[in-house]
Amino acid sequence: INSTLHGYPIGRLRGLLPAQLNEEILEVLNNLPHQEMDALKVACCLGTMFRIERFEALKYEGFYESLLAVIASHGIFDKIDVEHYKWKHIAVFEAVESIIISNERIEIHGRIADALNPLTVDHVEGDAQFARHYSMAERWKEAYSQYMEAGKKAERNLDFLGALSLYKQAESCLKQMEGQPSLEQMLSPRIALGLCLRELIRYDDAEIELEYCLNATNNVSEENKASIEFTETYLKVITALATLKQAQSKYLEAIELYDRALPIALENQGLHSQVWLASHVAAYAEILRKSGNVFKAKKLHSEALEYRTAAVEVGACTILELASSYTQLGCTLFGLGDFSQAFNFHKKALVARVEHLDFHHSLVSESLNYCADVLQSMGNGKDGIALGMHAANIRKTAFGAFHPAYAHALSVLGSCYHSIGRSYDALELLEECLDICEVAFSMSHANLIPNLMLYGSILRVTGNLHKSRSVYERALTIHKKNFGDGNEKQRKGMEDQLLDEMILITNPKMKAPLDMAIPSIQLESEKEHLLICVDVGSRPSDE
């Protein structure tokens, strides 16, 4: 490199250095034995950093031994740890990459993919790397399958952005495949994209993907609609669209879609597990619960629990599946006002999840959050605060500071503070909660209603009566828009609750003393004494 630099002005070096440096490097590399050069090409196709065990899978072709010889004698790679190596200089990597011709590259990636295929892969990166090698080898069908599998693993890790990218790669592979892909192959990436976009609160984009899928199924000929493949694909489409409509608080549309879906699921249950059937029954029950039909929701959630219990008894799934039913039944019983039973179910879910998951898992935070909410509803908000704090911290880390899941935790924690008289602490939490919800949801989304009701109550107690009234009125308007044509008993109960809160605003005797300023005490000595109130909670973790 020094000899290359000698005698060249800086301006000319900018144009000449890369090419000449590449030539200098290749001049050295061309002196390597043929087997070692082949090993470098394989390493180049693996990437700038690789695991040595991947070469071990290629032992029968001699690459592993050749690579070890290069590592031992030429100093081209840096050892990161026991398994991982990286190219010491990117210029050497690029030099090797520049001499791999197209057909040779395809062959190398194919060898790598075939050698790695039997290995067990536990991480998303492994499946994505498999997919990349298949893609570079122009083996599009295998690449499609690996990208789809990697996307599913990313979803399980709550990496929805990563999953989005992987599903788009899978969709790209379809365009390269020979022949016409099946309906299931064609729509699976788009269904998965719609579900990920829903989780990312990108409802409009999700709707575009899923409506495309629905139109595609509608365009299938009547003859082909009789096939099992069509039925299974159609079921995936309408259930994905139903859960999106639920998330958008379009409950009547969601119910209409699941009224079509559930009979299909029941008819085809012989092709699937009891856990699969339970998930469909529970999904329909959740839509009914959110729409206000809690009695029918309770019946269906109890049915889903029976399916999951039977699956656990035969070892078809773990107790974590039961925890899902416990949580859903707990929420349903909460809606029915049976707080004691609701708390028992949420507590059972929490015990199961803490036992089988890391404490900072998002599902643990869900159970903590619901336990805190039930406790404050039972008049024990003091004990709910600690649980609510843990839930909020976990959700902020798992989902981010602008996700509705974190907003829900803030709302529950705020209700706990409000229930024990610490309404000023609750006020800040609810304002942060609503700031998130206003961005994430539409102006008339049903999820705003309970947060607005709580916010209105806190404003009333803290003395901001005018703003409290406007908040209650907005909650009432949103409620009428979402439930005006729905369950009459549920609608009237909610409206009566809102009206009762608004009546309290007009009754000064009902106003809590928290809004009163603490007066100073003027003594004859003309010295002013201040009364200072400090609330540190019942334990250090409360503050």
Image (cartoon, helix red, strand yellow):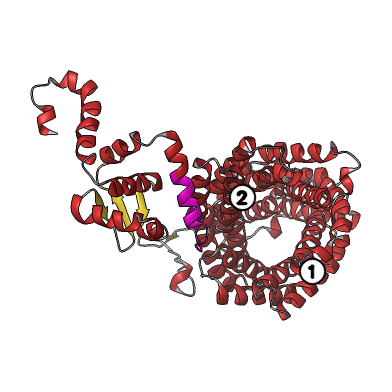
Within 10 Å of disc 1 (Cα), the crowding (few <14, some 14-19, many 20+) is many
Q: Which residue is mark 1?
A: 304
Magenta stretch secondary structure, dominant? helix
- Which residue is more in the foreground, 99 or 349? 99
At horizontal 14% and vertical 34% (from top left) the residue drawn is 1
Instruction: Decide whether residue 109 is among the magenta residues.
Output: yes
Residue 230 seen by the camera: yes
In the image, residue 78 lies at what x, y percent? 25, 53
At horizontal 50% and vertical 53% (from top left) the residue drawn is 114
Within 10 Å of disc 2 (Cα), the crowding (few <14, some 14-19, many 20+) is some
The quadrant where residue 279 appears: bottom right
In the image, residue 193 lies at what x, y percent? 65, 44
- Which residue is more in the foreground, 285 or 115? 115
In the image, residue 75 lies at what x, y percent? 20, 50
Q: Which residue is mark 2?
A: 145
Magenta range is 108-126
**Tag 1's secondary structure?**
helix
Give yes or no for contact between labels 2 and 1 (Cβ–Cβ under 8 Å): no
- Which residue is more in the foreground, 314 or 300? 314
Which residue extends farthest left?
A: 7
Instruction: Decide whether residue 271 is among the magenta residues.
Output: no
**Tag 2's secondary structure?**
helix
In this picture, is 494 found above or below 476? below
At horizontal 24% and vertical 35% (from top left) the residue drawn is 26
In this picture, is 122 found above or below 34? below
The quadrant where residue 266 appears: bottom right
